[in-house]
Image (tube, rainbow, N blue to C red):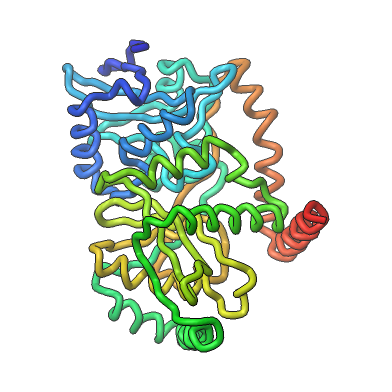
Amino acid sequence: MTQEAELPGKRVLVLRPDELGPDDLKMWREIRTESGAPANPFLDPRFTAAVGRVRPGARVVVLNEDGTPVGYFPYERGRLGRGRAIGLGVSDSQGAVLRPGIRLDARRLLRACGLSSWEFDNLEAGQDAFAAHAAEELASPVVDIGEGFERYAERLRATSPGFLRQTLAKERRLARRVGAVRFVYDARDPGALRALMEWKSAQYRRTGRRDRFAQEWITRLVGLLGESEEPECRGVLSVLYAADRPVAAHFGLRSRTVLSWWFPAYDRAYAKYSPGLVLQLRMLRAAAADGIGTVDLGSGPARYKDSLKTRDLRVYEGAVVRPVPGGAVHWLGREPARAARRFVRNRPRLANAAARGLEELGRLRDR
């Protein structure tokens, strides 16, 4: 279903992800490497291809100059031409993949795609054409482990000595009171993955948030990525066991050098041992040994992220909106709610009260 359009000096092809050929996958990755951006797996073509298998509106723009691809722009198309970042809601890094020096006008690009708007919530830094339309800049903490886990642990002892000491003590207590503790970094354990999804669904409900695993496309996407053998984009299930029973797990997405912290959860029956934090430390050690240089913890506040992080990246939330009817529909449907969330998020006391309210709502739903 190839569509063609024109931008100044560029030819635009709009394809389904499954219409990209091997040369496109190679060129996409070459351009990404040339840009110097982190090798985040969410901006790898295989992530777009996986989303394309579970989301029928997935598309990719191929930008050509003189017959040569100079950029790729993955997105999803909805009703009235409303667009969104590929995998919006679960993708932690979004934007276009452009050869250095390529400049775009975001609204002209959307017009060429037949889009009235394009929404993003984790736009990576350096995406200037889209960042100009951002409503908010967010911190996305990362953990740098490229120099090895021991060097990172030294820094952690200096910046958060109590955090490291207490977490290791809880791991020893877990082993004494429950049973032998073992950790598998890259587990092939369907039972543990099912347990993770159940724990995570319960957490979403408990905190009054929408259950992502109640959405079939997300569950299918996790399954596809868990089966992937692509070194630049594949799922990794890490599991902490006590007495051979899973007590915490994490399903993440990795490239050769970046691991994205994606779906962590634990069995609340063992909450007093902080199995999620024990798993994180074990996972950081294993990831460093496996060649990972950066673990991206994702945007959104959390106390454990502040303890673990070594620095923050900047990401952006917002939307490019064209002055057409579909753009007006997007603005009326999304922007007032986004403004309300921003108002609450920027006022800690109000944000804490809102979080408590959501948790109480979750408890009422479970009764």
Spot occupied by residue 226 in the image (x, y as percentages of width and height): 38, 47
Q: Give residue 79's quadrant in the image.
A: top right
Question: What number of labels is visible?
Answer: 0
Image point 57% across, 80% down: which residue?
273
299 to 232, vertically: above or below = below
Spot occupied by residue 282 in the image (x, y as percentages of width and height): 39, 73
On the rendered structure, is 14 left or right of 327? left
Spot occupied by residue 94 in the image (x, y as percentages of width and height): 42, 41
On the rendered structure, is 65 left or right of 183? left
On the rendered structure, is 183 left or right of 233? right
Image point 70% across, 37% down: which residue?
336
Q: Nearer the viewer, residue 143 or 190?
A: 190
- Residue 134 seen in the current view: no
- Residue 31 seen in the current view: yes
Q: Quadrant of the N terminus?
A: top left
175 to 111, vertically: above or below = below
26 to 299, vertically: above or below = above
Q: Give residue 293's quadrant in the image.
A: bottom left
Image point 76% across, 62% down: which residue?
356
Q: Nearer the viewer, residue 276 or 155?
A: 276
On the rendered structure, is 26 left or right of 59? left
Image point 42% across, 18% down: which residue?
113
Q: Quadrant of the C terminus?
A: bottom right
Spot occupied by residue 123 in the image (x, y as percentages of width and height): 45, 43
